[in-house]
Amino acid sequence: MVTMVVFTLLALAAAAVVLVVASVADHEPDDAAPGVRGYLTDVRSGLRTMRSDRPRRGATGGAIRQRPDRGADRGASDLDDFFDATAVQAPAYVAVEDLTETLARARERAARGVSGFTRR
């Protein structure tokens, strides 16, 4: 049980190190504090934003959720427009015929290998 707790703590520590390294790698010159201090500032800012987005209780006791207008952030496009704009007419990266031929060859080789073991 102790080893599982130790490995879990090591995994959490490794994840924290990866997050800090990623925040340092994403450092831009206009950022105030790079490194661990900048990472902690970003985490606090995110938590503050999450707390401010929680639903507030109204006079009736029901939760009133104030959501920003998502359409203003998205602009005039949506996911379908994005896929239409990035569509290409080139052939697919993986051709179905090549895939079926490869799978057929692999099945034949596997069947030959298995039949070789049964002749003993």
Image (spheres, rainbow, N blue to C red):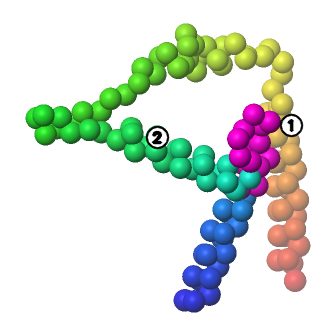
Residue 67, above or below 12: above
Work out whether residue 45 or residue 115 is closer to the camera in this orientation and state it. 45
Residue at 86% in and 45% down? 102
Residue at 84% in and 62% down? 110
Residue 120, above or below 13: below
Question: Which circle, 1 or 2, is nearer the viewer?
Answer: 2
Residue 8, above or below 88: below
Query: Can you say which quadrant of the picture contains the C terminus?
Result: bottom right
Residue type, label 1: Asp
Q: Which residue is mark 2?
A: 49
Q: Residue furthest bottom?
A: 2
> Can residue 22 be spotted in the picture?
no
Residue type, label 2: Thr
Whether residue 87 sits left or right of residue 114 in the image: it is left
Whether residue 96 sits left or right of residue 112 in the image: it is left
Q: Does the segment drawn in magenta span residue 30?
A: yes
Work out whether residue 100 or residue 116 is closer to the camera in this orientation and state it. 100
Picture coordinates of residue 15, whole percent (x, y): 67, 62
Q: Residue furthest front?
A: 32
Label pair 1/2, CB-CB below 8 angstroms: no
* Range of residues picked out in magenta: 20-34
Work out whether residue 40 or residue 64 is closer to the camera in this orientation and state it. 40
Picture coordinates of residue 13, whole percent (x, y): 66, 69
Question: Which SS class for mark 2?
Answer: helix
Query: Can you say which quadrant of the picture contains the N terminus?
Result: bottom right
Question: Which SS class for mark 1?
Answer: helix
Picture coordinates of residue 119, whole percent (x, y): 86, 78
Q: Residue 98's mark?
A: 1
* Most common secondary structure along the magenta stretch: loop
Work out whether residue 99 or residue 16 is closer to the camera in this orientation and state it. 16
Question: Around disc 2, counting alpha carbons within 10 Å, would you say few (fewer than 14), some (14 to 19), or many (20 or more)?
Answer: few
> Can residue 1 be spotted in the picture?
yes
